[in-house]
Amino acid sequence: MLLHHFQGTACSPSTAMQTFAVLMSFLVAHGATAACLTDIDCNFNGVCTGGSCACDPAWTEANCSKLNFLPANKSQGFNQLNSSWSSWGGSAVHDPDTEMWYLGVSEMANHCGLGTWHSNSRCVIATSKMAGGPYVRQSVVVDPWCHGASLARDPISGRWIFGHMGTGDNKQCFQCERGVTPEGASANSSCGHDSKFETMASALIADSPQGPWTAAPGLINGANCEPFFMPNGTLFYACPWGGKSSVPNCNGQTAFLQMARAESLEDALAGRWTYKGRTPTIQLAGGPPGPICVNWEDQTLWVDSRGRFHSLFHAFRGQPCDYPLPGCHGASSGASCTSLGGHAFSEDGQHWYVSPIAPYDNSVAYDDNTTVAFRARERPHIVLSADGAPIYLSNGLGDPPAGGSGGGNVGRPGADHTFTAYVPLNAAP
């Protein structure tokens, strides 16, 4: 990337970073290309060959910075657009024993919208014969309150883990219709406890994705902690991390991810972690070493065929961000900031490079030749093929703004429907 030319000059890191941001904004806006020097310049989504990036099929652009989408189908995903239920993202995993896909997902009980997530959210299992869905709910794993569902399968033992936050013991929920929370609704209805689990604050484990699920206190659990198994059974977790920032205009805060590693599921269950909660280092891809302003959330995790770590984020959590460009600060932190993805990548899961370019925005192109701009696009999850290649991007999507006011990710009363979308990626070599 161009910032290699600034290294070794008299520019301070902040001055060089600001100059790079201006130049990169110009290049992105005008479709310009840049030669690569290493695979870092290809965002680890391809290889640098003869000064140019040869991108993996799921990625595109000169530096492999954007996901290479195919047209989506409106019937795919879970709680589809205009359905009578709202959901907010989850992870799908293939079961080689049944040849089915299982989705762990957060859904709003009682046909309510995302505006009730703090009371009505529950964690469910849905299934499909196809990776992209449509997914159909099969069971409630944890009743309200439960949120941030994630699912993973140990390739060695065949056991399943279900991560979440919440204890499943909320008694009062909103009652709604059509997946939308009406004006003036109040939490005075039963939460409809269908499962036998309550006060389930720990992660869960089962021999089958159909259950029965039991508590697994040794596993990491919490706010959107994302598990990932390597083919040899090594277990990684990516969890939220927050620290202080010295970067100007960053509110003194940084939000990113931190990693944990266990050599096997059995080690993790026994509390034998190789490392846990390590503070990451973060650097702009192609930029000089030094801190940058990122306040990202909803991290996901996978390791590619070359052994490199990747994470997609929702690239805004209500605090300033310089990246992805053009950044989100103050008055500019509007609807677009609730919809941008962020991509970070790493050789070792400790030192991370942040791409300055958003891998996706709030628009989805469909196979009926329509394109929809959604009010929010968060909770990213990558769906992987049997050989570990990205084949779908899943997000929680907020229906397009109604009445001229989007209301951000949770919408507003009468217009807070959300669903879990699956958009195919180019997986052909």
Image (cartoon, helix red, strand yellow):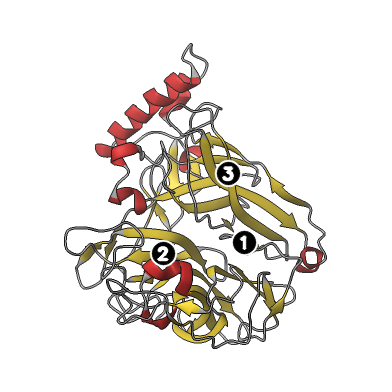
Compared with residue 322, is residue 234 higher up or lower down, i.e. above or below?
below
x, y percent for residue 199? 65, 75
Left or right: residue 3 versus residue 302 is left
Q: Which residue sits at x=32%, y=56%?
A: 408
The amino acid type of the residue labelled 2 equals Asn
Residue lying farthest to the top in this orientation: 10
Q: Nearer the viewer, residue 209 or 302?
A: 209
Residue labelled with disc 2: 395
Tag 3: Cα neighbours inside 10 Å, few (<14), some, or many (≥20)?
A: some
Q: Residues within 10 Å of mark 2 (few under 14, many from 20)?
A: many
Residue receiving disc 1: 222
Q: Are marks 2 and 1 in contact (CB under 8 Å)?
A: no
226 shown above or below 161 = above
Label for residue 421? none
Residue that carries the numbered disc 3 in the rendered image: 242
The residue under label 1 is which amino acid type? Gly
Point out the tag, 3 or 2, that comes first from the N-terminus: 3
Labelled pair 3, 2 in contact (Cβ < 8 Å): no
Q: Is residue 162 left or right of residue 148?
A: right
